[in-house]
Amino acid sequence: MKTILTFAFLFLSLIPFAQDINRKMVDEKAKGEILIGLCNKQGLMQTPFSDWSFTEFNTYKPDTRVLGELKNYTGKWRVNIVFGTWCSDSQREVPRFLKIAENTGLSSDDIKIIGVDSQKTGGDVDISGLKIEKVPTFIFYVNEKEIGRIIETPKVNIETDLLNFLKQ
């Protein structure tokens, strides 16, 4: 009985920390439904976001030479992505990044995607410490230390910019 009570207490104590994933809401300023808070690829590939996410994901052709080099770093870095489903730069760059991640074998555990509203708040996810001014913002880390950011658009392309951060 003591074991059951201990298990029940532990389980119930975790409930307040559980966050919804791929939560949708209507943003009046964005004039439509958006993703807010923690998201994943599956959330982006559902309607109404699938129109642009499928197209961008399926048509983007990453630089295969750079992808080959990035594979050498897989498991050594992670990324936080803050984006808005209402933002055209996010609609282009986030699916492209997801294609790069898939082609390099990056684990979904190493990708944290946070959707924001038009006020750049992440719902249940506090992003105040990330200093987000524009979206999308990709923040890359090695050993929990930030090594670089791509803000709105990459200098060359996402894969090349990322490789340059990793080689520094």
Image (tube, grey):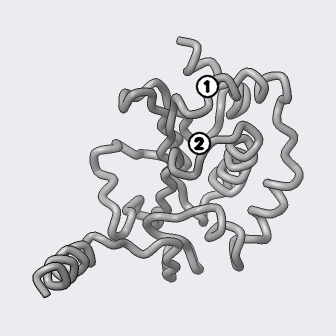
Label 1 or label 2, whichever comes before in sequence order: 1
Instruction: Look at 39% across and 28% down and name the residue there.
Output: 143
Indicate the position of residue 32 as horizontal and vertical percent values.
Answer: 59, 80
Q: Quadrant of residue 129?
A: top left
Quarter of the rendering containing residue 167: top right
| Classed neighbour count for the residue bearing mark 1: other residues with Cα under 10 Å, few (<14), some (14–19), many (≥20) | some
Which residue sits furthest bottom? 1
The structure residue drawn at horizontal position 59% and vertical position 42%, both measured from the top left corner, is: 152
How many numbered markers are drawn?
A: 2
Q: Looking at the rendered structure, which numbered label has been put on residue 28?
A: none
Residue at image x 19%, y 84%?
Answer: 4
The residue lying toward the viewer, choosing from 24 and 111, is 111
Which amino acid, mark 2? Answer: Glu
Any mark on residue 152, and which? 2
119 in relation to 75, above or below: below
Hey, which residue is sitting farthest top in the picture? 168
Q: Which element type, helix, strand or loop, lies under badge 2?
A: loop
Between 121 and 31, the residue placed more toward the observer is 121
Give the side of residue 146 with respect to residue 74, left or right. left
Q: Please state the horizontal and vertical placement of residue 140, each as a whole percent of the image.
A: 49, 33
Residue 120 x/y as whole percent: 41, 59
Examine the rendered structure and indicate whether residue 55 appears above or below residue 93.
below
Residue 33: percent from left, percent from top: 58, 79
Report how far apart the C-alphas of labels 1 and 2 lie in the structure. Answer: 24 Å
Residue most extreme to the left:
2
For image coordinates 49% across by 77% down, the residue present is: 23
Q: Which residue is mark 1?
A: 73
Mark 1 residue type: Tyr
Q: Which image quarter holds the N terminus?
A: bottom left
